[in-house]
Image: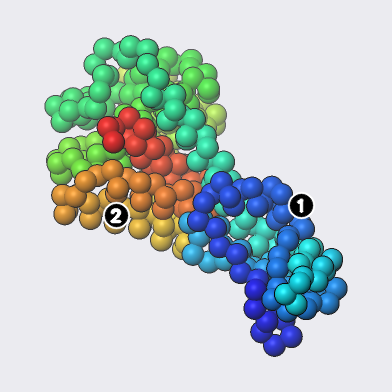
Amino acid sequence: MSTEGTEIWARMRFDDPARFLEFFDKQLGPGLVGLRHSEPVAVGARIHVAVTPPGLTESLDCEGIAERVTPTADGGARLHVRIALEGTTRARLDAYLGGIEAGRRVGAVTQTATRPAEPEAAGEQGPPTLDELSARCAQMEAQTYFALLDVPTDVAAEALQRRFHDLTRRFHPDAFFDAEAELRATVGRYFRRINEAYAVLKDPRRRRLYERGLAGPPHTWALRLTEEAALTAQRQRRVRGGETQTGHWHWSSAREILQRARDEETPTRPALVEAAKMLRVALALEPTNEHFRHALEQLEYRLATEPV
């Protein structure tokens, strides 16, 4: 802690997420933080507490009041500071904690991935090859969204979501960051169409419009909803790199780490670890960003399944 003018500042930095969560559960969340100061402090003194959680470059600035003061033998004081989390600080903290919770869910997925899996459907074992992806791309222009996702036309929302997540784990472009350029381009093209299909079918209104089109003249049965597809692509481009400046920075940093590892032909695992850290922070800042979530899922999956 330091004294600047008549104000007292306390700076707390955490490198271990587990320790930060313990601090939040026991102190910051309930609003009563324990601190020590090298000089005497009066009850009611105003305290500024700057807390920096793991992965954040900017601290969370909290205002507090010294509610209880206990003098120490060295002439300092032990403080119990009443903290009020409001406004921007509360919003940033909620977003960060939401990202950690999302990371926990991803961790549960990766733990499941390390267990013996049930046999996969024929033709979907292991990473896709360039030949398989090229064949899929050649077929997708003549396929309905249902055929593209390989689901029945009466598929329920939960089953549709599970199928999309299965396809995402296998075809997300971030799983191919160290592959040949042609393979990366082909999987990116195929994954964009998967996203497009899912975006339409998961929305009840857009799905009804699409099904109505399928019931029309034969020559229109496989046509996409051109306007809807354009809007979907526009929205995907907007959110892909992040809707906040800080989220975009962490997302871009993750991409640069992976690109540098590929260009320099360095071991991939350290790059995956560092990129995953950046994506966790990006997701904490934008917890509803599905692209960040799926990209992190891919990195976590690779870390869980590839040899150390």
Q: What crowding class fits label 2: few (fewer than 14 Cα within 10 Å), some (14-19), or many (20 or more)?
A: some
Secondary structure state at the residue bearing disc 2: helix
Q: Would residue 123 be visible to someone looking at this image?
A: yes
Q: Quadrant of residue 172?
A: top left
Q: Quadrant of residue 192?
A: top left
Alpha carbon distance from label 2 to label 1 = 38 Å
Q: Is residue 264 left or right of residue 40?
A: left
Could you tell me the amino acid type at mark 1?
Pro
Q: What crowding class fits label 1: few (fewer than 14 Cα within 10 Å), some (14-19), or many (20 or more)?
A: few
Q: Nearer the viewer, residue 109 or 270?
A: 270
Q: Nearer the viewer, residue 188 or 215?
A: 188
Q: Quadrant of residue 136?
A: top left
Could you tell me the amino acid type at mark 2?
Ile
Q: Is residue 235 left or right of residue 100?
A: left
Q: Is residue 64 left or right of residue 138?
A: right
Tell me where residue 95 appears, x and y as whole percent. 59, 52
Sequence order check, earlier mark of 2 and 1 = 1
Q: Which mark is residue 30?
A: 1
In the orientation shown, which residue stands out farthest toward the bottom?
5
Q: Nearer the viewer, residue 209 or 161?
A: 161
User: Against 137, is 40 above or below?
Assistant: below
Quadrant of the image containing the N terminus? bottom right
Q: Which mark is residue 21?
A: none
Tell me where residue 306 appears, x and y as whole percent. 29, 32
Total numbered circles? 2
Residue marked by disc 2: 257
Q: What residue is drawn where x is 32% and y is 14%?
A: 120
Q: What residue is drawn where x is 71% and y is 65%?
A: 35
